[in-house]
């Protein structure tokens, strides 16, 4: 696909995201020959760099080297500006005009907001005042990082503010999970294969489990995280987007709106959580100090930037239903947490057992053998579990695996989420970005939980860092002998004692 020449303008360029994700993604795109012939990157930030010192900073941060990288950096520029000052925007406009004229980038600009969220309304308004949102001299696109609002009302307000300057078709709200190759593969698995679709509904699926576990804690982001928590940081966006891809109806085409209309319908069909019984739907946890591999690790409240009496959740598990013909009565369980035993994100489709259970598992228990595990990361792939007779007398049945791993595709490397998302934005394809109505629908769904958290009523359960979260999280899952799957790093294994 050919791409239009353009300038990527990164607001908040001196921040961590630029050096860690955006610049490496653009560099990889350049190496892969995906960028337009004439692309330029203009970093904008308060810090006082010039083009040269900014390039030197990126050099240190990204740890890339070689001739290719030096050539790439020649396309990177810097403009120091106070992003809230109108005067500085005039200077920015002059700089853009100058770069555009010199490098013939055809007036196409992507404005990427990698700033603190307080500036998400301000920057578009000031760009708009200078006419930089108008598309008469080239296209103009606005990329907005998460968090998009902190609750339903603020998300609505932010949508109103931005939509008064830019059209929805110019907006690219980032949910980096949608940029992950394995997340997009959910669509292909479901809608590119005739064998799964007949089973993909309430008649054959018992329940669905989605886990996004992280072994890291809050690291250097204690200040931000303490005002956010797992519910807003992971559930409202990443986990609900995964839910939508698992649960949506087949779109009429691969057109951006066709896909996004279907995901919106899922959000609109989420059964509202019963405000009177939220404890039946929601478990909150916070990691406490413990010993991992012989080393004492800090509890959440001892982390830098975190209130010593914080009630912010670092673990959240939610049970909910989707009220439509496909999913009526099927529970969805989602959980996420920091300082869990391993980093793994996966979706587990638990199929119903046979109507009459003839066989037992080899070690005596009855079980549903059939599960499909869609592994988002790491050891990306798909695993299908089914029962198989153990050789020998009797009918002992063992769980057997059939799997596909991306690592088996030796000729192909998984691209980073930011690489894919930036390239899509350059191509003007917003399919993998969240639409305003969907973002609001997700906030609407979790708003009762936000209100409950604010009231200070819900319990927060401590869990030792390095464990799988609050002890009673297993009781959450209905059904005989049902628990969460305890995934290992390796796709095919699970259990509490595997290699992590
Ligand atoms: C971010 C959250 O959106 O996603 C982080 O703010 C979290 O807290 C991260 O660590 C997880 O992303 P990934 O791609 O590592 O699963």
Image (tube, rainbow, N blue to C red):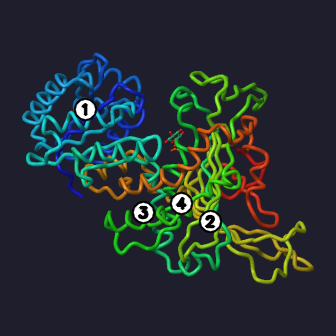
Tell me which label, 1 or 4, sits earlier in the chain: 1
Q: Nearer the viewer, mark 4 or mark 3?
A: 3
Quarter-of-image position of residue 109: top left
Q: Name the residue under label 4.
A: 243
Q: Residue furthest right?
A: 393
Q: Quadrant of the N terminus?
A: bottom left
Element assignment for label 3: helix
Residue 88 drawn at (x, y percent):
19, 23
Could you say which is closer to the camera, residue 4 or residue 85?
85
Relative to 270, residue 316 above or below: above
| Residue at 21%, 44% in the rendered image | 165
Q: Is residue 386 above or below residue 345?
A: below
Please name whichever residue, 180 or 332, is drawn nearer the observer in this view of the structure.
332
Within 10 Å of the Cα at label 2, are there few (<14), some (14-19), or many (20+) other Cα atoms? some
Q: Dot 2 lies on which element? A: strand
Q: Where is residue 106 in the image (x, y as percent from the top left)?
A: 10, 44
- Pointer 3: what residue? 264
Query: Mark 2–mark 4 contact, CB under 8 Å?
Result: no
Q: Is mark 1 on a helix, strand or loop?
A: helix
Q: Distance between the residues labelled 4 and 3?
A: 11 Å
Alpha carbon separation for disc pair 2 and 1 = 42 Å
Query: Is tag 3's residue or tag 1's residue first in the polypeptide sequence?
Result: 1
User: Residue 124 appears in which quarter of the rendering?
Assistant: top left
Question: Is label 1 in contact with label 4 (beta carbons under 8 Å)?
Answer: no
Does the Cβ of the disc 2 residue fall within 8 Å of ligand 1?
A: no
CB at disc 3 and ligand 1 closer than 8 Å:
no
Q: Nearer the viewer, residue 307 or 405?
A: 307
Q: How crowded is mark 1: few (under 14 residues within 10 Å), some or many (20 or more)?
A: few
Q: Position of residue 429 (x, y in %)?
A: 29, 57
Q: Considering only vertical position in the picture, is 349 above or below 216?
A: below
Disc 3 vs disc 2: which is toward the camera? 3
């Amino acid at each position: 696909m050919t791409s239009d020449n353009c300038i990527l303008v990164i607001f908040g360029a001196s921040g961590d995201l630029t050096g860690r994700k955006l610049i490496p993604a653009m560099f990889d795109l350049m190496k892969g020959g995906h960028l337009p012939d004439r692309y330029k990157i203009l970093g904008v930030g308060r810090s006082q760099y010039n083009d040269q010192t900014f390039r030197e900073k990126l050099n240190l941060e990204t740890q890339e080297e070689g001739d290719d990288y030096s050539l790439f950096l020649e396309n990177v520029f810097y403009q120091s500006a106070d992003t809230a000052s109108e005067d500085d925007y005039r200077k920015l406009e002059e700089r853009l005009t100058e770069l555009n004229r010199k490098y013939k980038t055809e007036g196409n600009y992507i404005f990427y907001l990698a700033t603190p969220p307080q500036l998400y309304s301000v920057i578009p308004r000031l760009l708009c005042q200078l006419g930089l949102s108008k598309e008469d001299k080239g296209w103009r696109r606005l990329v907005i990082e998460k968090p998009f609002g902190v609750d339903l009302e603020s998300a609505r307000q932010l949508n109103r503010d931005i939509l008064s300057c830019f059209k929805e078709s110019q907006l690219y709200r980032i949910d980096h999970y949608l940029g992950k190759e394995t997340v997009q593969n959910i669509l292909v698995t479901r809608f590119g294969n005739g064998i799964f679709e007949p089973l993909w509904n309430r008649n054959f699926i018992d329940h669905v489990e989605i886990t996004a576990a992280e072994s890291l804690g809050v690291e250097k982001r204690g200040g931000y995280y303490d005002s956010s928590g797992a519910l807003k940081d992971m559930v409202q966006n990443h986990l609900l987007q995964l839910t939508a891809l698992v649960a949506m109806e087949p779109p009429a085409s691969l057109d951006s709106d066709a896909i996004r209309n279907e995901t919106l319908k899922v959000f609109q069909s989420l059964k509202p959580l019963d405000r009177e019984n939220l404890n039946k739907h929601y478990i909150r946890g916070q990691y406490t100090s413990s010993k991992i591999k012989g080393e004492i690790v800090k509890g959440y409240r001892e982390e830098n930037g975190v209130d010593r009496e914080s009630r912010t959740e670092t673990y959240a598990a939610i049970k909910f239903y989707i009220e439509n013909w496909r999913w009526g009565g099927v529970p969805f369980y989602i959980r996420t947490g920091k300082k869990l035993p391993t980093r793994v994100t996966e979706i587990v489709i638990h199929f119903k057992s046979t109507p009459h259970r003839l066989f037992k598992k080899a070690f005596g228990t009855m079980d549903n053998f059939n599960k499909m595990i869609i592994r988002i990361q790491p050891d990306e792939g798909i695993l299908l579990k089914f029962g198989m007779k153990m050789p020998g007398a009797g009918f002992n049945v063992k769980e057997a695996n059939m799997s596909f791993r991306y690592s088996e595709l030796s000729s192909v490397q998984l691209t980073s989420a930011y690489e894919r998302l930036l390239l899509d934005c350059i191509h003007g394809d917003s399919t993998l970005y969240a639409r305003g109505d969907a973002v609001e629908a997700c906030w609407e769904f979790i708003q009762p939980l936000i209100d409950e958290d604010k009231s200070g009523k819900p319990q927060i359960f401590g869990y030792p860092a390095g464990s799988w979260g609050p002890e009673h999280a297993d009781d959450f899952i209905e059904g005989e002998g049902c628990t969460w799957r305890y995934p290992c790093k390796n796709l095919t294994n699970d259990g509490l004692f595997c290699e992590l």
